[in-house]
DNA sequence: CGCGACGTTGATTTGCCTCAACGATTGTGG
DNA sequence: CCACAATCGTTGAGGCAAATCAACGTCGCG
C-alpha cells in the first residue's frame, strides 16, 4: 500500500493503532506527476495537503519583475502545502512544481479537519512536524545572513547533501537568491582553491 | 491576574473551561525586564517558552564577523522562544533581548509538556499558532526576494505599522539585512519623492 | 554635565547583476 | 534513430546597488 509510507512517517513521532491506521489511510488519494507538472499554481487556492511518496518538488514565488525564487525543496517522505492558502482558503502566491517524475498522496481540507477530530493525536504529531519545519525555515533565514554567497552555498551543500546532487544548479541558485551565472563563478572559484 | 492575558490569547482560538484555566495559569512565572536585558543568550539552552504581557523583544543571531541580525520582533500578547533549542535542549544560536522595559510570563519544558497532557486541546491551539508563525516567517522569506531594499522597507512598514514607530532605525536595518547608513539614505530618498 | 546610542552625510570600494554569446547535454517528435 | 529544440552550465565585459570607513550633530539619560 502506498499509504503505508504515511503511517511510517507518523510513527516516527507517536505509535498509531490499527484502527487509527485505516481511518488515516482512507481519505488519501494517489497521484502521479511528470517532471515540470504543477501541484499548485499561484492564484489558485491550495486545496490539498500533499505527502511525497517518491520524487522531488520545489515551491517558488515570482517577483514583480517575473523572476522565480525557490522557497523550499521537498523530496520523498515529507509534506508540502502552502499553509497560508490552505488554511485561509485564499489565492496562493506560490507555485509547487515537480522537479522529477513523482508520486504523491493528497488529502483535502474537509477530510483533514475530520481526521483531526477522529484521531486527536494527529494534532500532536502535526504540531511537532510543523515545529520542525519552522525551525528549518528559521535556519534558512539565519543562513541568509552569512555575508557571502559562497558561504551560503557551502551551508546549503552541508544541509542538503543528498538533495543537492539531484538538483540542477539553476534551481540551487534560485534558492540562494543569486543568478546561475554567479553560482557558476563561485563553483569555479572553489575548484581553484583546493 | 497577569496570566489572564494568556487565557484571552488562547480563547482567540478555542474556548477554555474554568478548570482548564486554572491548570494552565498555575505553572507560569512572572518576570520583569529592563530595556536591553536578555531573556536568552546564544550558547545557553532556551529553557522557557515566554508570553509577552507588555513591552517588546528582538531575537537575533550574530554572524562570523560579529554583526547582529534581527530575525523577529515580538511585542505584547505574543509568544517567543528559540524552538530549536527549547525542544532539542541544545545550546541556542540566538539571543532574545528586551527593546523596552517589559513584563513576561514563562513556562519551563517539564511544565509545558505536563500541560499538553492535562489539557490536550493545547496541542490544537499551539499547532494553529505555530502554523501562523510559520506563515509569517515564510512571508518574510518571500519579501526578501523583493529586489530593492527600499521595497523591503516599505513592505516592513506595511506589515508592522504599529511596531515600526517603537523601533529605532538601527534595529529595523538589522532586520532588513542592510546597514543603518543605507536605511538612512533610503528614507531621505523617499522624502524627496513625495 | 558627559557619555553612549542614534541618525545623517560624503567618498570610495566591491559583490553581484546584466546582457550576450557559445558548447554540451538531454529529450522528443517525425 | 536521427534532427532539432530546449535546458543547462560556462565565460567575458561592463554597470549598479549596497557596503565600508570616516566624520559629525543630536538627543536622552545616569
Image (cartoon, coloured by chain):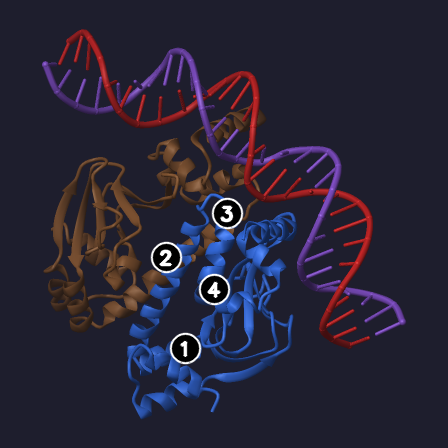
Chain colours: A brown, B blue, C purple, D red
Question: Are labels 3 and 4 on one chain?
Answer: no
Numbered mark located on residue B62 in the image: none
Question: Are labels 4 and 1 on one chain?
Answer: yes
Query: Label 3 belongs to which residue?
Result: A144
2 or 4: mark nearer the eye: 4
* Separation of residues labelled 1 and 2 (CA atoms): 20 Å
Chain letter for mark 3? A
Q: Nearer the viewer, residue D12 or A1?
A: D12
Toward which corner of the image does residue B125 lie, by quadrant?
bottom left
* Separation of residues labelled 3 and 4 (CA atoms): 21 Å
Chain letter for mark 4? B
Q: Position of residue A126 (x, y in %)?
A: 29, 64
**CB contact under 8 Å: marks 1 and 3:** no
* Separation of residues labelled 2 and 4 (CA atoms): 24 Å
The C terminus of chain A appears in which quarter of the rendering? top right
Query: Label 4 belongs to which residue?
Result: B160
Q: Position of residue B105 (x, y in %)?
A: 50, 81
Q: Earlier in the sequence, mark 4 or mark 1?
A: 1
- Element marked by disc 3: loop
Q: Is residue A17 visible?
A: no
- Element marked by disc 2: helix
Characterize the local packing of mark 1: few (<14), some (14-19) or many (20 or more) Cα atoms within 10 angstroms: some
Chain letter for mark 1? B
- Element marked by disc 1: helix
1 or 2: mark nearer the eye: 2
* Separation of residues labelled 4 and 1 (CA atoms): 30 Å
Q: Nearer the viewer, residue A18 or D11?
A: D11
Numbered mark located on residue B112 in the image: 1
Chain letter for mark 2? A
Numbered mark located on residue A133 in the image: 2
- Element marked by disc 4: loop
Question: Are labels 1 and 2 on one chain?
Answer: no
Amino acid at each position: 500500500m502506498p499509504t503505508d509510507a504515511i503511517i511510517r512517517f507518523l510513527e516516527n513521532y507517536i505509535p498509531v493503532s490499527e484502527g487509527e491506521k485505516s481511518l488515516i489511510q482512507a481519505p488519501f488519494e494517489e497521484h502521479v506527476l511528470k517532471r515540470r507538472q504543477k501541484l499548485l499554481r499561484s492564484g489558485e487556492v491550495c486545496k490539498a495537503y500533499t505527502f511525497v511518496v517518491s520524487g522531488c518538488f520545489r515551491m517558488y514565488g515570482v517577483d514583480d519583475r517575473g523572476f522565480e525564487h525557490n522557497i523550499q525543496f521537498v523530496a520523498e517522505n515529507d509534506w508540502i502545502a502552502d499553509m497560508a492558502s490552505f488554511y485561509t482558503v485564499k489565492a496562493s502566491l506560490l507555485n509547487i512544481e515537480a522537479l522529477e517524475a513523482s508520486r504523491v498522496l493528497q488529502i483535502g481540507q474537509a477530510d483533514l479537519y475530520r481526521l483531526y477530530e477522529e484521531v486527536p493525536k494527529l494534532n500532536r504529531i502535526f504540531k511537532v512536524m510543523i515545529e520542525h519545519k519552522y525551525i528549518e525555515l528559521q535556519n534558512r533565514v539565519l543562513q541568509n545572513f552569512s555575508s557571502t554567497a559562497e558561504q551560503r552555498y557551502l551551508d546549503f551543500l552541508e544541509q542538503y547533501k543528498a538533495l543537492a546532487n539531484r538538483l540542477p544548479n539553476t534551481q540551487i541558485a534560485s534558492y540562494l537568491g543569486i543568478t546561475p551565472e554567479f553560482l557558476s563563478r563561485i563553483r569555479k572559484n572553489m575548484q581553484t582553491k583546493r
